[in-house]
Image (spheres, rainbow, N blue to C red):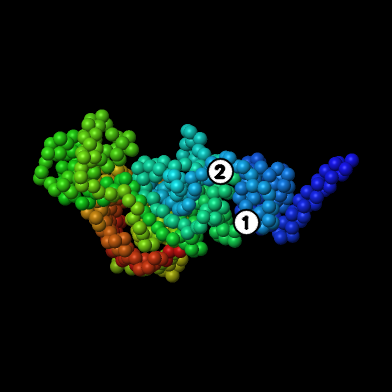
């Protein structure tokens, strides 16, 4: 009888202690505490995590109070559950002093074994041939005692998904997403060698306890699923939530409720003083161009012969016409060239022999160069100012002057000059401008979509440029608005470090009351001085099916004033239905 009474006493004591802890937690408001809601991934009063086995309470995905109560109960009754929810336990213990016996968590201990000690946000630059990649991608790099790892958050896209389904499902949240922890080398190869994108690393000043908070929470959610939205619930929005777990009182993720793009979270981390240093690692393609920039014309021609099997590698090895340094550069450039060809799946069988020979020469060389290195940057090279407000005065030498006021919603034009990165493309969505002419306001133009992919071609690699533009604008002397669609295809060549030349053919359709078709040729020379001044000289020949033949010559100048202000000064001669000349001065403000 005494033993039964003693057992009942123990049970009553435990239950009383449990109720006391729960009451204490509720009195402190822990069920509505911002950190608790972050651990549950609550947004708009419900969790974004779809997996019910992530929650202890049956309604834990919508009821943070119920989830807190059930979490405390299960920690008390089944202490081994701490192994599944280590971040929850660590925080609750700091608030409630739970003082539970340390559990033997073998799987968790194995996960933490590498001793994660440094975190970096990795931003991927745009892909040189894809304007859609202009928004970039973010990952969380983790340095450890073993190897660097990376946490990557991405959509699970089924094989065979076509472009239309990809866009629709990505915008409507039909894709499921997942976190993955993997060796950093895999993502490094994918982006720098496979897609030829630079990696910019932002080192975070987090201490060991804060890094532990992140990794414990990642352990809790690593097998969960969420709905993936391209614009709002993506790689950036989820990584900033993960970093927000580091500090109990931080509000990093609070600033993001709607559209989130990768560069936004970088600037948010800068705003709250998380970033301590910035480094850049060039892509394999950029490294190749950096190497050949150190070769003269004769040396480049020899390199071209070597990689095209028009000159024997064995003969080159015996060549004493070049210095050891120049020979080493030519060999390294040749190896990089074949690596790039291999990645592009354009390496043919006849190239294998010179490729192997050049690799053998590189191994034997005593002169070594390191182009694959981290470059320390003094400031963030990427701008987060993608909205543009602009005004212009159009002074027509042969007619009425105009005043123009416009706004662009997203994202950037390659002539924007708001940051330090040279751009190989344009992505503009919804650019609208009004004009005042003859004391009347009217629509000047509406650009719905403007995409340009403009990779550089040379004797080694030939890449086509592609342009798509869709909108409404004035085209002919009747001054009427025409809806239009244009597509252009051509090539862009780099003459020197600062000078590019491009030419392309363009076709299109215009509509007002009937269809009018366009066939066009355009050619331009572009001078870029340190990305603070660009001057472009352009010639256009446009033939329309309504009989109009437009010949335009223009000189467009883009000048950077500050990080958020630029001006354009454009001169244009138009030999269209009537001849005219005009000067336009644009003042642009980015925010």
Residue 505's spot in the image, x, y percent?
30, 46
Residue 269's spot in the image, x, y percent?
49, 59
The residue tagged with tag 2: helix, strand or loop?
A: helix
| Of 220 and 21, the residue lying toward us | 21
Say which quadrant the N terminus sits in: top right
Say which quadrant the C terminus sits in: bottom left
Q: Which residue is mark 2?
A: 109
Q: Residues within 10 Å of mark 2 (few under 14, many from 20)?
A: few
Q: Which residue is mark 1?
A: 35
Q: Residues within 10 Å of mark 1 (few under 14, many from 20)?
A: many
Is 23 left, or right, of 573 in this rendering? right
Residue at image point 46% right, 53% down: 118
Residue at image point 84% right, 47% down: 9
Does the image show residue 43? no
Does the image show residue 366? yes
Residue at image point 46% right, 48% down: 144
| Of 124 and 563, the residue lying toward us | 124
Mark toward the start of the polypeptide (1 vs 2): 1
Q: Quadrant of residue 193?
A: top left
Instruction: Choose mark 1 or mark 2, whichever is in front.
Output: 2
Residue 253's spot in the image, x, y percent?
56, 57
270 is higher (above) or lower (below) than 4: below
Residue at image point 15% right, 39% down: 317
């Amino acid at each position: 009888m005494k033993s039964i009474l003693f057992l009942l006493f123990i049970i009553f004591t435990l239950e009383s202690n449990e109720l006391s802890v729960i009451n204490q937690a509720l009195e402190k408001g822990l069920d509505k505490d911002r950190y608790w809601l972050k651990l549950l991934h609550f947004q708009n009063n419900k969790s974004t995590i779809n997996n019910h086995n992530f929650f202890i309470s049956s309604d834990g995905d919508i009821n943070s109070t119920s989830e807190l109560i059930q979490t405390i109960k299960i920690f008390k009754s089944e202490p081994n559950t701490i192994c599944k929810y280590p971040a929850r336990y660590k925080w609750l213990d700091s608030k409630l002093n739970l003082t539970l016996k340390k559990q033997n968590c073998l799987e968790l201990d194995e996960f933490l074994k590498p001793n994660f000690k440094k975190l970096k946000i990795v931003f991927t630059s745009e892909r040189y041939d894809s304007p859609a990649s202009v928004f970039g991608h973010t990952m969380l790099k983790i340095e450890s005692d073993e190897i660097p790892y990376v946490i990557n958050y991405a959509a699970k896209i089924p094989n065979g998904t076509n472009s239309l389904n990809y866009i629709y499902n990505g915008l409507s949240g039909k894709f499921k997403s997942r976190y993955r922890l993997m060796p950093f080398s895999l993502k490094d190869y994918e982006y720098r060698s496979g897609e030829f994108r630079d990696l910019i690393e932002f080192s975070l000043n987090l201490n060991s306890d804060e890094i532990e908070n992140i990794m414990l929470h990642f352990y809790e959610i690593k097998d969960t699923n969420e709905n993936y939205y391209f614009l709002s619930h993506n790689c950036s929005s989820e990584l900033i939530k993960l970093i927000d777990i580091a500090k109990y009182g931080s509000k990093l993720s609070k600033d993001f409720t709607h559209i989130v793009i990768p560069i936004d979270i970088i600037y948010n981390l800068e705003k709250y003083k998380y970033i301590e240093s910035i480094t850049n690692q060039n892509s394999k393609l950029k490294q190749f161009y950096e190497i050949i920039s150190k070769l003269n014309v004769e040396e480049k021609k020899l390199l071209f012969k070597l990689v095209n099997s028009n000159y024997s590698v064995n003969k080159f090895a015996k060549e004493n016409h070049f210095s050891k340094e120049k020979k080493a550069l030519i060999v390294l450039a040749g190896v990089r060239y074949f690596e790039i060809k291999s990645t592009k799946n354009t390496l043919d069988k006849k190239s294998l022999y010179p490729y192997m020979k050049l690799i053998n020469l590189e191994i034997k060389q005593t002169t070594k160069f390191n182009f694959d290195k981290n470059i320390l940057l003094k400031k963030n090279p990427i701008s987060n100012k993608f909205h543009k407000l602009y005004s212009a005065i159009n002074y027509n030498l042969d007619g009425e002057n105009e005043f123009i006021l416009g706004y662009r919603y997203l994202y950037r034009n390659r002539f924007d000059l708001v940051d330090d990165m040279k751009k190989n493309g344009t992505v503009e969505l919804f650019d609208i401008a009004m004009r005042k002419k003859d004391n009347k306001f009217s629509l000047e133009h509406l650009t719905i979509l403007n995409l340009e992919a403009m990779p550089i071609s040379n004797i080694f690699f030939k890449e086509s440029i592609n342009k798509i533009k869709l909108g409404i604008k004035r085209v002919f002397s009747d001054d009427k608005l025409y809806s239009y669609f244009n597509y252009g295809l051509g090539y862009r060549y780099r003459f020197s470090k600062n000078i590019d030349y491009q030419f392309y053919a363009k076709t299109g359709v215009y509509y007002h009351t009937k269809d009018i078709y366009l066939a066009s040729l355009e050619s331009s020379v572009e001078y870029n001085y340190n990305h603070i001044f660009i001057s472009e000289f352009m010639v256009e020949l446009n033939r329309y099916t309504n009989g109009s033949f437009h010949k335009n010559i223009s000189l467009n100048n883009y000048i950077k004033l500050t990080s958020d202000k630029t001006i354009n000064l454009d001169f244009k001669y138009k030999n269209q239905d009537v001849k005219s000349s005009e000067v336009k001065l644009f003042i642009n403000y980015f925010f």
